[in-house]
Amino acid sequence: MIQNMFSMVSSVWTQFNLTGLTLIHLSLFGTALILILVIGLPLGIITALSPRFSIIIQILNIIEMIPDIALLLLLIPLTGIGATPTIAAAVLYSLLPIVRNTMTGLTIIRPELLEVGSSLGMTSIEILRYIRLPLSLPLIAGGVRTAVVYSMGIVTLGGIIGARGLGAALQAGITRNNMTLILVTGLWIGLLAVFMDACAGLCERFLTNRYGDQS
């Protein structure tokens, strides 16, 4: 029985080229995550340093309330179908935890630590670089961990709008009523998500052990 199951999984994996789709899936996910960090960290810093930019959090909260499928569909007229709207939706949907955690991490640093930096003649930029940002890393890592989960989900949904990746295989399984394909792809996506979350969790734990008791 186990041999038959393995043979069935192997057949589905080969027939639908799940290895190739996995690489595409991870490419979409990786691109989205890089953009989330490149955009989210500066926005979080700006929001922390200037209360005027707190509107950024409000805008991202509104985006967060839009169902993920609806967000994908709303982006199609602007970006077309395929990878572009999928990555854009993943970025928009996942910015909030990064921005919010970065802002929070930068604003809860103990005042005496900032006073030490000032007494040493540090400029505000140096205090940000050498004190506030390092001590904010545990919270930022927590935001990244949440963004990882969000992004993986959005990238999977991108399969319904032609983004390929494992979401396309899942969609094919639903369209063809192929339960084996649905189960294999669904379980594989779940394992990938758990693995990514575990990696992010290890980074968060390391940074918390190193900086968590100082912020």
Image (spheres, helix red, strand yellow):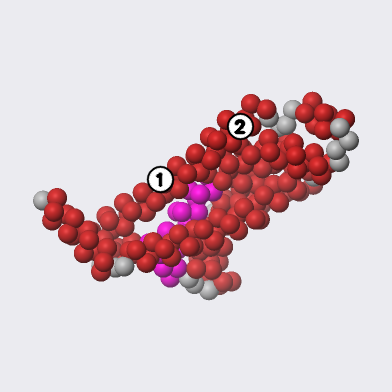
Q: Give the range drawn in magenta.
A: 146-166
Q: Disc 1 marks which residue?
A: 194
Q: Position of residue 32 (x, y in %)?
A: 55, 59
Q: Which of 91 and 19 is in front in this view?
A: 19
Vertical position of residue 14 compared to residue 57: above or below = below
The mark that comes first in sequence, 1 or 2, is: 1
In this picture, is 74 found above or below 129?
below
Q: Distance between the residues labelled 1 and 2?
A: 24 Å
Q: Name the residue under label 2.
A: 210
Report the residue at 88% width, 35% height from top.
121
The secondary structure that dominates the magenta segment is helix
Asked if residue 163 is among those painted magenta in the image, a careful observer would answer yes
Percent coordinates x, y for residue 133 in the rendering = 71, 40
Q: Position of 37 compared to 8: left or right?
A: right
**Which residue sits at x=73%, y=31%?**
109
Is residue 171 visible in the rendered image? The answer is no
Locate the C terminus by quadrant: top right
Structural crowding at the residue carrying mark 2, measured as other residues with C-alpha within 10 Å and reported as few (<14), some (14–19) or many (≥20)? some
Q: What residue type is labelled 1?
A: Val
| Picture coordinates of residue 50, whole percent (x, y) | 80, 45
Q: Which of marks 1 and 2 is in front?
A: 2
